Amino acid sequence: MLAYIIRRTLYAIPILIGVNLLTFVLFFVVNTPDDVARMHLGAKRVTPEAIEQWKQEHGYDQPLLYNRKASGVAKVTDTIFYNKSMRLFAFDFGSSDAGRDIGEDISQRMWPSLAIALPTLLIGLLVNISFSMLLAFFRGTYLDLSGVMLAVVLMSVSSLFYIIGGQYLFSKLLHLVPVSGYESGMQAWRFVLLPVAIGVFSGIGAGSRWYRTFFLEEVNRDYVRTARAKGLPEARLLFRHVLRNAMVPILTGIVVILPTLFMGSLIMESFFGIPGLGSYTIEAIQTQDFAIVRAMVFLGSVLYILGLLLTDISYTLVDPRIRLS
Amino acid sequence: MIQHVFLWTDTLIFILLVAVLGFAWFARNKEHLRAPWREVVRSRMAVASLVVLSIYTITGLLDSVHFRKALPTQEGQQEVQYSGDVLSVLDTLLGPMRTQDEKTYSAPFAAYLYARETVTGADGEKLRIFPRLEYGGAGLTDPATQKGADIARRTVTALAEAVAVLLLLYGMLGLRLASKWRQSWMSALGAIAKGTSDVPWRTALLTLGVFVLLIALVVNLSGAYHLLGTDKVGQDVLYQTIKSIRTGLVIGTLTTLVMLPFAVFLGMMAGYFRGWVDDVIQYIYTTLNSIPGVLLIAAAVMMMQVYVANHPELFETMAERADIRLLFLVLILGITSWTGLCRLLRGETLKLRELDYVQAADAFGVAKSSILVRHLLPNLMHLVMIAVVLDFSGLVLAEAVLSYVGVGVDPTTQSWGNMINRARLEMAREPMVWWSLLASFSFMFTLVLAANLFSDVVRDAFDPRLRAQR
């Protein structure tokens, strides 16, 4: 097991290098730091001195890959690639273009993100499983048919509609919860309630339709038929046998997104003014802060790869037929 | 005098159109290709959604033929100058809707502006009133009493026109089917009305009827009123949502067109050749996949913005600049979304290459390229078809989110995402300006729902695994 984990972790390294190279090409080769500086300084006619100064302030005044002027190891280390891209491997995110420490920001802002994302995931899971089990129980009837139809309708609605509509209904008309904002500590629940509810609701359509296929697949298996032939009541069959086996694909499907929960949801956080990583990213995109976007791309890839690793491990844990190889 | 303008996305749209028509022509006599489609058009759900999708598509196509009008020539001027406004055929059809701009917000069917203005009265007294609109309800002398009657009169006209058009269509369809089935006209009409025909023509006609009615309403009412109100700068909201259709379709269809060659080629290569080819291709798509999609799109679009900002000389008109950004968004969405299909095709190819007929072809010495093209590709097409149809609705929805994040289409491009984004800021206004949101959400919902329903039927018809179960 341990050897497997180590080997899988080693596989992640070339992928991370690939991600890093890709972002490097995107951020520094397609457009040179000069272009970025000109963009930040705004006006069309910017003096070369101003550009130089901006580059110096933000640490972009080095060659991209190879520094001829330096000597020894510094030939490679005094470059943008080393300082801006390689350092990400050590989770040293440096400072943003606005001058703040990115690592510090991330460690502070991931908790509000988690406060939204984790309850959304758990409650959503519960709701989707219940709904899809209900449909599977009544499979082939009009209830099932209309349930599936409802799911298709729900998933055809833009997620932005759920957010805007939810905010309007619950915050503006009914005054049940604040429109947006966040508070740390126990008072946070008032601000978390609505985003979580909307997140769960907007996921019902796609989620329950997907889970329903898992249930139906299990329902048609031989062991279910045997159990039914032996006289097990349908409800008990569904809860004791089908649910357990259908949970395998559902749970292993969730593992891959577990680490990325820290990243938060972009639109949800920015609509509700939650100071998490999602809104952090959006702000960075809108203020064109390349350093933050670069850091978030890297962080997201690391977490995704971690998710893949956890998925593989969880498969072997829940299903003894799968051997590690 | 007009000058045709070929935007990049226009060209691609028409290439796609030609490809689809070409495929239809190619498949018309091939039973194995026609069979699943015949099954699709037998479903009432699919036919209704197909009608909706066709209407959206036609609107999008009309909006994809662009031109610039010539400016009136000055004295002593030799060359003809063209206006900087790039118009489309749809713009000409929508005529008054495009040009009749008000000052600012006005509610649907309103005759008065939505905001008070200070007006100096006849006796020099300052009054705060809701001024009359310049175009909305302009023909009325006293809107309070006349508006209801005027709208009712126009609605009745629209209704009559719609019924007439629908009856005409019904009759023509009856004639066509009568000659096909070798029956009398009356019995063909009866079969349609009773819904006993093989293809559910009644459903198709009724769906079409709803749209004919809507179009008739727009034709009769839009000259005199703003049916869905106006936005902050006074532009007609209905015009904006109709113009947004093209953007949604471009993103939904061209993205798949862009990614298909990559996904199919690489997926088949990886599955067929295995070994190091497989390793390299798997490495590429795992790497691309591990970058969160929105962030990759954001990063790429930001780079695009820098490039466009630094090279203003490359783009002659605003429309061309907005178009290049749309094209770029399509490309980058394609790059982020081909991995799923590629993995699917790789797995299927791995399975297929072990089958007897492929092994036999290999043993006979058939070239690898022709094994791939003639023996493997046709057996993968159902997966491709399903993926294309399934991706469409997701991409249309994604556009709205991306535009909200600020990495979607150009702010000057009409799109549902941009409309929602602008209208969102008016949420806090009392009373609320709701019509922009409602218009964009309902147009988007109709398209996505139709696409989702259609894709369900297509998947059922094309997936051999599902077909075997029945």
Image (spheres, rainbow, N blue to C red):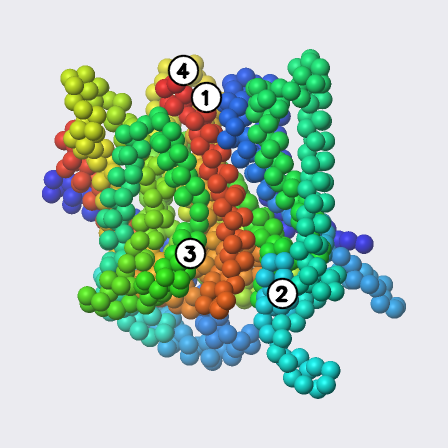
Question: Residue at the location (61% across, 78% down)?
Answer: B128
Q: Amino acid at mark 3?
A: Gly
Q: Earlier in the sequence, mark 4 or mark 2?
A: 2
Residue under disc 1 on the same chain as residue under disc 2: yes
* Mark closest to the chain's N terminus, 1 or 2: 2
Marks 4 and 2: CB-CB under 8 Å?
A: no
Please tell me if label 4 and label 2 are on a single chain: yes
Question: Residue B132, how many percent across, how many down?
Answer: 68, 69
The residue wearing badge 2 is B234
- Left or right, A310 with respect to B238, comes to left
Callout in the foreground (4, 2): 2
Q: Element at badge 2?
A: loop
Q: Which numbered circle lies on residue B375?
A: 1
Spot occupied by residue B213 in the image (x, y as percentages of width and height): 65, 41
Q: Tell me the distance, in whole angstroms, between the alpha carbons under discs 2 and 3.
A: 24 Å
For discs 1 and 3, the disc positioned in front in the rendered view: 3
Check whether the beta carbons of the residues at disc 1 and disc 3 lie within 8 A of each other. Answer: no
Residue A177: image location, x then y, percent: 31, 63
- Residue tagged 4: B357
Mark number, residue A238: none
Q: Report whether A203 appears left or right of A286.
A: left
Q: CA distance from mark 1 to mark 2?
A: 58 Å
Three-letter code, disc 2: Gly
Q: Quadrant of the C terminus of chain A?
A: top left
Name the disc covering residue A165, or none. 3
What is the spatial separation of the Cα atoms under label 4 and label 3, in whole angstroms? 56 Å
